[in-house]
Amino acid sequence: MRGRWLLAASVVAAILVTAGTTAVLLRVEPKQPAAEAIKTGGLAGGAVVALYALWLNDRRRRTEEARHELESDKVADERFARAVEMLGNEADQVRVGAMHALAGLARAAPRYKQTVLDVLCAYLRRPFAHPAFVVRPEDPDQAFHRAGGDVELPTPEEDRERTVRLTAQRLITDLLPWGQDTDPTLYHLDLTGANVEYLRLEGRRVGRLTARRTRFHGITAFREVRFAKPALFSGGTFLGRVDFQRAHFLGGLSLQDTAFAGEVDVREAEVDLFVHLPPTPPTVVGSLTVRPGARVKEDPAGWPLTGLAEARLVGRDD
């Protein structure tokens, strides 16, 4: 109905413009031929109709774009639902394919990226144990399985599930921005209570990392990671070496009640806002820099810290 009224209004406006333009021309230049005045008036009226046609085409284009966007969103939602459903499939290759489908969706539709990261983290939080997680004193950094002794051999199902979980870890790393990636979004990771191995986030930019009671098997590589929000490892266990070189904990760092089986490399690492350290330090390589004004919870005696004089030492309950 609105379109019909606009069409009628444009026709009336074109007629009025034509008549008005013709009358003005005949009045201003009475000597010119009437046919020329009428022709010029017709062109002016035609311009009104042309403007209406342009507006109508633009409206149709915007409507078509909106419809196409709605269809794309619907297709993306269906892809997401199918991929999540396939994560429960018994076949490991199907679960791996579902994870790659989710990662592809996150790259094609960035609004899904945090949701996909949440799903992958949720998969890693599922209970899982593997004979390779048994720490051998002679090789604590490694998480692969060696037969012999009283260590059981892994079942084929355990090995396949381990491969799926390693795929989830790799895709999480790939989806996080790093280097020249200009994505300003802060993406959060929740690995609470998970079993992860050889977790590598080198150079990535992360929002909040929640890894309470998480068990890190093998070497954990957080070199040059930039945490914009708190990085929480409270109650976690690092069963291999930890690389925090040049990591920036802009939102604070909690290692409360965290256990370490290997050395921790903190060379050129910096922490802001707050840091909570366990009373018994591991073997630490380098010195952790505490930014001025940051809160240091409990007595950090034994931890090599730089800038402690400008920090604020507070109690457990502060």
Image: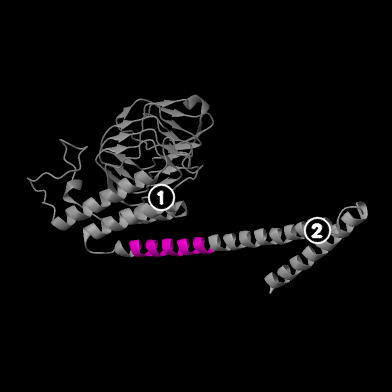
Write the residue at 88% across / 53% down.
Answer: 32
The region drawn magenta spans 67-84
Which of these two is toward me, 126 or 75? 75
For the residue labelled by badge 1, is the local secondary structure a helix, a strand or a loop?
helix
Write the residue at 36% across / 43% down.
Answer: 257
Write the residue at 45% across / 65% down.
Answer: 74
The amino acid marked with disc number 1 is Arg
Residue 82 is a magenta residue = yes
The amino acid marked with disc number 2 is Gly
The circle on residue 37 is none
Earlier in the chain: of badge 2 and badge 1, it is: 2
Is the image coloured rainbow, by chain, by secondary structure, or in one colour? one colour
Of badges 2 and 1, nearer the viewer stands 2
Residue 200 visible in image: yes
Residue 235 visible in image: no
Residue 281 is a magenta residue = no
For the residue labelled by badge 2, is the local secondary structure a helix, a strand or a loop?
helix
Write the residue at 31% across / 55% down.
Answer: 99
Q: Position of residue 298 (x, y in %)?
A: 44, 36
Query: Residue 245's image quarter?
Result: top left
Residue identifier under label 2: 41
Residue identifier under label 1: 107
- Specify the principal SS of the magenta part: helix
Which of these two is toward me, 96 or 272? 96
